[in-house]
Amino acid sequence: MVLNRLTKFFTGASPHLSRVLAMKVFKRDQFTCQYCGLDGRNNLGNWMILTIDHVHPHAKGGAQTMENLVTACQPCNLIKGKRVFKSLQEAKEYVLARREEWQQKFEEQIKAA
């Protein structure tokens, strides 16, 4: 309880999307991450990590409209975070570049282990 209140204090209230709106976004985006292309249609594991992302972050005043919401896998959503981008394309370029960096670091760590 106290932890929940502290989390809300530091991060702000989380946006609550209705299941109906979330399903509209998933269907429009064909259950595919709009950043990396992860396909959640034919793989339960992939489907389970799909989330809804605000292109313009809710924490920065982004609206809960279809134009501002996209399907994103959890890793891409985490990488993008609360950063503000001019467009989905700009956000996608940022996320893909960071994923590539993380992939290289991961491979280096595996080789070193």
Image (cartoon, grey):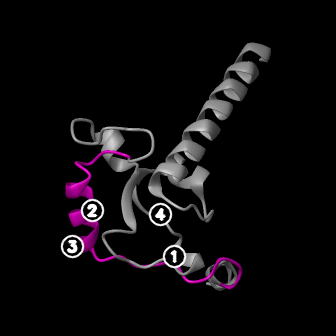
Which of the pair 18/28 is nearer the observer?
A: 28
In three-dimensional space, the C-alpha distance between marks 3 and 2, rounded to whole angstroms, equals 9 Å
Residue 29 on the magenta span: yes
Q: Is residue 101 left or right of residue 53?
A: right
Q: Where 100 sits versus 74, above or below?
A: above
Residue type, mark 2 in image: Val
* Mark number, residue 67: none
Mark positioned earlier in the residue sequence (4 or 3): 3
In three-dimensional space, the C-alpha distance between marks 4 and 1, rounded to whole angstroms, equals 9 Å
Q: Which residues are magenta?
A: 9-33
Residue 26, quarter of picture: bottom left
The label nearer to you, 3 versus 2, is 2
* Residue at mark 4: 55
Q: Which quadrant holds the N terminus?
A: bottom right
Residue 62 lies, in percent from the top left, at 49, 77
Q: Which quadrant holds the C terminus?
A: top right
Q: Where 67 sits versus 39, above or below?
A: below
Residue 18, quarter of picture: bottom left
* Mark number, residue 25: 2
* Residue at mark 1: 58
Element at label 2: helix
Tag 2 and tag 1, C-beta contact below 8 Å: no
* Residue at mark 3: 20
